[in-house]
Amino acid sequence: MHKKIFSFLFLLFIGIYAYAQEDIKKDSLAVNLKGKIISVTDKKPLESAHILNLNSVEGTTTNRQGLFQIPAMANDTIYISYVGYQSIKLKVTKDLLKGNELEIAIHEKTAIIDEVTVKAHDLIGVLVVDAENVPLDKFNRIHIDGLPQAYEVGRPQSKKYNSGLNAVFNPIDFWYNKLGKKPKELKKLKKLKDADKLRDIMEEKFSREVLLTYMDMSRKDLNDLLKECSRSDRFIRKASDLQVIEAVLQCYDNYRAVQEGKVKKDIIRVNNQGNN
């Protein structure tokens, strides 16, 4: 009996040691990739551009001179973004890690302005009356002091299914099973949410590009997932990338609790077929 316990502890120690050595080896191979982000048009440096290593999930921002440095290894992918400019992904090669400072020029986005219709509302200056005359979104997102997450009040959207096959398909279930096969991607999403520097970066982003890369899904699939997670159209349009990450991780944890039988299935909405 004692021999079996000793053998188990020995194998456990060997496993932990090997895993730790692998991390140390990775850290020792990483070097600081140095560069400067500028605008293609006027060659001026871009301050506060976001730099994210998609492999190690480490992030930083450029200083006033547009300079940055970030740990990287060969074959890592560096994601670079700046408000109003086209985001790019840079594949790190051994040549880029030789110590030379990179100069990376990015292009401004081409803005397409849609036609806007302005509607007048008859307001008289009395709050109670005016509140009735201003149309409100059917969902309101509220924050409660002392709680980290926000809540939306109102009726969840009722999804219409065109066929029995569509009714069987559940985006939450699909994503839950998909992430179960990719625990590293789930770990990366959680790091984006928990690390202070990364939280600051994701809170300023609204493009969903990083999130779509880690989740390996299209924008439409992400929107469908958020709807199944009881998020409104307004939230899907207006939420920051950090809020979306928090929403999908909370939905994942809730769904996992249901699957493991820790909570009753009717506590959270996992299907929109019924009229709630």
Image (cartoon, rainbow, N blue to C red):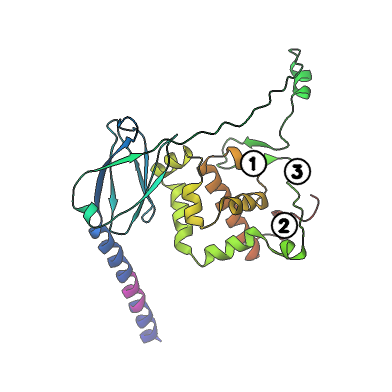
The label shown at residue 151 is 1
Going by the numbered disc 3, the residue's amino acid type is Arg
**Hey, what amino acid is under mark 2?**
Asn
Q: Residues within 10 Å of mark 1 (few under 14, many from 20)?
A: some
Question: Which segment did they paint magenta?
Answer: 11-16
Residue underneath mark 3: 155
Quarter assignment of residue 94: bottom left
Instruction: Determine the residue located farthest toward the right in the rendered image.
Output: 275
> Separation of disc 3 and disc 2 at Cα?
14 Å
User: In percent of the image, x 32 and y 29: which residue is there?
Assistant: 42
| Image coordinates for residue 95, horizontal then vertical, percent | 22, 55
Kind of element beneath mark 2: loop
Q: CA distance from mark 2 to mark 1?
A: 18 Å
Q: Is residue 14 magenta?
A: yes
User: Residue 265, located in which quarter of the rendered image?
Assistant: bottom right
Q: Is residue 142 left or right of residue 35?
A: right
Numbered tag placed on residue 271 in the rendering = 2
Asked whether, in this view, residue 98 is left or right of residue 238, the answer is left
